[in-house]
Amino acid sequence: MIQQIKMNKRAVLSNTLISTVVGIMAIATVVAGISIFLVSQKNAAAVWEDYYAKEISRVINLARPGDEISLDVTKAVGIATKSQVRSQSEIFTFDNPNNEVCVKLAPSRKTCYPFFNDVDVINYETLPVGDIKDGKPVSLLKFKVAERPVLETI
Amino acid sequence: MKNKKAQVGEQTMNLSLLLQLGFLALGIIAGVWIFFYNSGYDFRSIDAELLNSRLQSCFRQNNLNFSLPREEFFKELFETCKIEQQEITDDWVIAIYIDELSEPKYKHGDPLSCQLQSKNEGLPRCVESTFQITINEKTATITLYTGTNQRSIVRRTV
């Protein structure tokens, strides 16, 4: 009789242990999932992509052919570097046939915004310059606004 | 002997805990998503303002032909003002009133949506300007509405 009670106690203990372990594992999984999600949003790459694409489109819409423009894009370059975007030339791209500026601050996506000014954006490059701001080298996006060549129909 | 009902209760408690955690996670993810992505950077008023000022200075500097039919007028307008016509999509509103405000002389999109912009966040944000130009040697008052509902496009890349 005493032996039976002891065995039952062991069974109860092991059941309680299993359910506690399962509960702790569930909590740990959910907390880890939430943490990974929040950390991945910390850079807010999507928000900055949207911001830069729209602000650059504003600059292009205000520009005239012949203008040479330099923009401080240190924040964007910092986010892209942290997000492991492969090369700096991928961060800002201009699609002249579609009148779009595209910004890529995360590896698997880019945000594009159209501009209505009938011009081409040429000679664009993202360059680190010598100045230091907030302990990081300043990066500049340089581009030239050119008159769109008129396509002659035959 | 362990009570069977108690065992069932314990399992149910675990399940309920999991469900609660799941809802908590969903809530946090949805909150972050709505806060950061749903609103975006609302650029519509700025875009509308840019087009308005561009057209305004173009009207002042060029003698546009206001007797042309709609299609031809807009073609001439975009060519003269160096605006890429393809980019002025259905997301855009342009309404040009000459002297009277009852009916626009030329319109692209629905100017009525400009009047309702304060009531619905989904409608285009519009900008209005009034200025005077000379048409056929007479001074005319132009009221120009420009608006847009243009959003950025997110593309998946390799």
Image (spheres, helix red, strand yellow):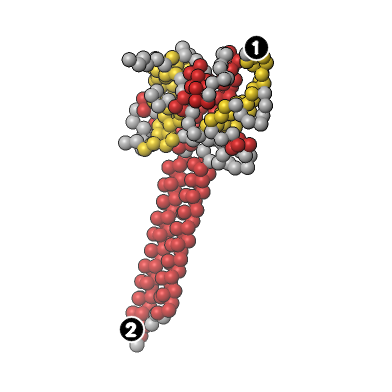
Above-or-below relation of B122 to B136: below
Q: Residues within 10 Å of mark 1 (few under 14, many from 20)?
A: few
| Element assignment for label 2 | helix
Position of residue A151 measured from the top left corner of the image (x, y, whole percent): 37, 16
Given residues B34 and A9, the one toward you in this image is B34
Q: Is residue A110 left or right of residue B151?
A: left
Q: Is residue A126 left or right of residue B39?
A: left
Which picture quadrant has residue A25?
Answer: bottom left
Identify which residue is drawn at 40% across, 34% down. Answer: A110
- Can residue B115 be seen at all in this image of the molecule? yes
Given residues B66 and B143, the one toward you in this image is B66
Amino acid beneath label 1: Glu
Quadrant the C terminus of chain A occupies: top left
Position of residue A35 measured from the top left corner of the image (x, y, whole percent): 44, 48
Are dots 1 and 2 on a single chain? no
Between marks 1 and 2, how big is the CA–CA gap? 114 Å
Which picture quadrant has residue A100?
Answer: top left
Above-or-below relation of A68 to A94: above
Amino acid beneath label 2: Gln
Tell which tag, 1 or 2, sits nearer the viewer.
1
- Can residue A78 be seen at all in this image of the molecule? no
Report the residue marked by disc 2.
A3
Identify which residue is drawn at 47% across, 54% down. Answer: B26
Q: Is residue B125 left or right of residue A6?
A: right
Position of residue B67 measured from the top left corner of the image (x, y, whole percent): 57, 20
Q: Residues within 10 Å of mark 2 (few under 14, many from 20)?
A: few
Report the residue marked by disc 1.
B137
